[in-house]
Image (cartoon, coloured by chain):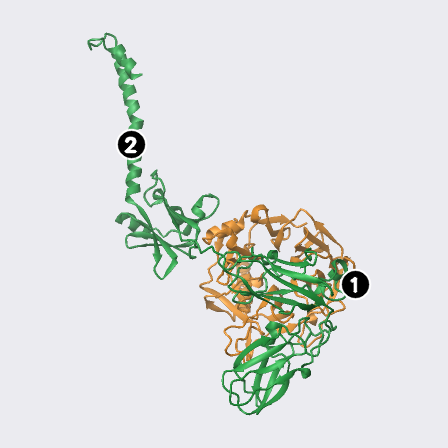
Chain colours: A orange, B green
Amino acid sequence: MKRFALYLALTLFAIGLLAQGAFARWTSEMKEGKAEFKSMGPLTFGPDGILFVADTKAAAIVAIATGDTKRATGANLLKVEGINQKIAALLGTTADQILIEDLAINPISQNAYLAVSRGRGPDAVPVLVRVKADSQMEVVSLDKVKFSRAELPDAPADAMAGQGNRQSNPRRESITDIGFLNGRLFVAGLANEEFASTLRAVPFPFKTVANGTSVEIYHGAHGQFETRAPVRTFATFKIGKEDHLLAAYTCTPLVQFPVSELTPGAKIKGKTIAELGNRNRPLDMIVYQKDGKTYLLMANSSRGVMKISTEQIDKAESITARVADKQGLPYETIASWTGVDHLDRLDSKHVVVLRRAEGGSLNLESLPLP
Amino acid sequence: MMTRIFKRMFNAKGQRIKGTRKRLRLFLIVLLCSFVPLTLCVEKTQSSAAWQSQFSIRWTSDPANSSKVAIEVSGLSDATIKRLQQANWKPPQWQRLLSVYAGQGNDPNLPPMLGAYRVQSGALRFEPQFPLEPGVAYRAVFRPDQLPGASGSKAAPITADFQLPPRNATPTTVVSHIYPSASLLPENLLKFYVHFSAPMSRGRIYNYIHLRDEAGKEVELPFLEIDEELWDPAMTRLTLIIDPGRIKRGVLPLEDIGPALEAGKSYTLVIARECRDGAGNPLKEDFQKAFQVRPPDREPLDHTRWQIQPPKAGARDALAVTFTKPMDHALAQRVISVTTESGGVIEGKVELEDQERRWVFVPDSPWRRGQYKLVIQTTIEDLAGNNIGKPFEVDLFEGVQRRLASPTVKLSFEIL
């Protein structure tokens, strides 16, 4: 019995050490202090409660060790009606001065994190808001956190050759979505000057090399023509045993890229596997499993949320010819889920959505996965 | 009732009527009962009044920044101050004692503002985490019954309202320019740049931008609508990208709803005055840019056909470069530079003239004799997104690494 207890204690100790080691692996490059932001855009969670926040104005991604690593107990269905009004009240302003830029659920604690802009003008203040399991809200203090930062290359360079007297560089690159997979953070963006959309992979933990952050950049191509159209949202997805990025472009074709092909110097060609109809902008997308099958759930601008079957995805032919409206993977529209701007998976059975209600109100709701 | 009992107890002469002992007892009981609530009521009023008069709420502004305001509650006894200092409360407990609501706190479902609580100089102080907004009504609510040791007290809350003067609501911001400046634009036009005279606010800009055909009919969804909106950092320039699916072959939307612009037709781009500037005010007026559409331009840029007009040495005269066609305004300003033969950068100011057909550079210092180079990044675009050596629609699959440096081409010229 004593020996058993000793083995148990040693095993637990070893597990503790391993867990600590795994956590240290992600946070070893981080420093503790105040994480500064000029703006907060797309959010995504990585391992061990690490939250990635895209700062478009600063052309940077910041990884924050939230320390929010206490596993959720039971199903806490988050629900906050009029969340924009409540956030406005917390921040001492009016609801029309609040923009909720993105939503991400911490897969460990199942707390929701919202990137919020207090104000709409150039002096807007970015704020990170957490909705806890009891649906109470709080502002996450970033004054003393462990964090690391990756500056994106091609960032606005004020010292353009020959233009030293210009006050500021008006170029900026919008970050439309970010996603973490196997030690790499994927970043989709679009510039406001030259027409170039980019898909970058930033190895994490972020490493600084001599000429800046080590970043690989890809220009995705889809269909028969290289459109340079921006990726609006994407999800990571396994087809067979291989990881893929499934990207939704602004004109809603769904394009898949094998992640293994995203290597520096490689010529990548995405495969268009679905056209989801026009007059429709994709907004946000998740992957989930139900009854042994895998689905995509896509919020979009003009219809209810789309549930897309992936059953035939490995056999899908690339769409290269012109199509009249819809083609490729079959989907159904969940018409009752109207006004959904953002969504993220809460647990194996629920999704959290941010949806527009009447009168300009925004509601945070937990809904059963369809 | 008491008068009736009294009359039954005494005769007209005021002598007590026999058998009225019970009535006297009843009279005394009723009299007592009628006084008790009155006494309690007076007590409550006096107590509340005493508390009310004891405490006061003061809004104090930072002289250096009027929107940085703090709230101070004074009138706390030394004992109460000491208890508050030792309370070690969490934010919800402080908020129960003193809260500040934006919008006067009329909605009980809305939480109070976030901020820091301090007990100092004999007062309770609340410093909001965020500055107050002009024109928004704020209400501070102090609840004395939540003070340590005041349990059971029925003291009513004390409130104090505050409002910063609203911003000037007179519309002054205008659209100062829309690029391209030309009024004849290619069918495969890629972008508009809308310049405003003051910083704007974002969040719903596409609602106020309309592209109308010659019949005044709205062109449906002509632009890429990016949630974040493509503003420059100063928020005085908005980039509108025409949905590439509406200007290219083979991509879906073109098939169904046709191109956004068609050659031979006229259009008007309207920026409605309802869009809001950074102060929340509408524009002074609508802005309209009328233009006609010419056939698509699918020619790559050929920089070797550009004409360079070098100035003379010894002065700061302008160096002018004439393009073969109008260029993208933002890129032509940013991606062309002048260097010496050895690569030393010449500092100066750039302007675009003649509807973005001419690039004009005035150096900060007088020109010296010698060989110079015009260095052009190949990412420069014409109005249709064609680059140097690459038309917009070429089927390229470039997965290669792109780092900070983008390829450049050079044109040499001499200053005599």
Viewer-proximal residue, B206 or A317?
A: B206
In the rendered view of the protein, which quadrant contains the N terminus of chain B?
Answer: top left
Can you tell which mark lies on residue A353? none
- Between the C-alphas of marks 2 and 1, the distance is 86 Å
In the rendered view of the protein, which quadrant contains the C terminus of chain B?
Answer: bottom right
Q: Please state the chain letter of the residue tagged with numbered disc 1 in the rendered image.
A: A
In what element is the residue under mark 2?
Answer: helix
Residue B233 in sight from this viewpoint: yes
Give the x, y percent position of residue A118: 49, 57
Residue A249 in sight from this viewpoint: no
Tell us which disc is closer to us: 2 or 1: 1
Q: Amino acid at mark 1?
A: Arg
Give the x, y percent position of residue A17: 53, 66
Viewer-proximal residue, A110 or A301?
A: A301
Q: Quadrant of residue A19?
A: bottom right
Instruction: Check the image and report above or below for B232 versus B306.
Output: above
In what element is the residue under mark 1?
Answer: loop
Query: Quick one: label 1, few (<14), some, or many (20+) residues within 10 Å?
Result: some
Give the x, y percent position of residue A303: 68, 51
Does residue A224 appear to the left or right of A58 in the view shown? Answer: right
Q: Which residue is mark 1?
A: A322
Q: Which residue is mark 2?
A: B42
Does residue A192 appear to the left or right of B295 in the view shown? Answer: left
- Residue furthest to the top: B18
Q: Quadrant of residue B24?
A: top left
Give the x, y percent position of residue A153: 58, 74
Query: Quick one: label 2, few (<14), some, or many (20+) residues within 10 Å?
Result: few
Instruction: Check the image and report above or below for A175 versus B12.
Output: below
Instruction: Check the image and report above or below for A78 versus A33.
Output: above
Instruction: Check the image and report above or below for B182 versus B213.
Output: below
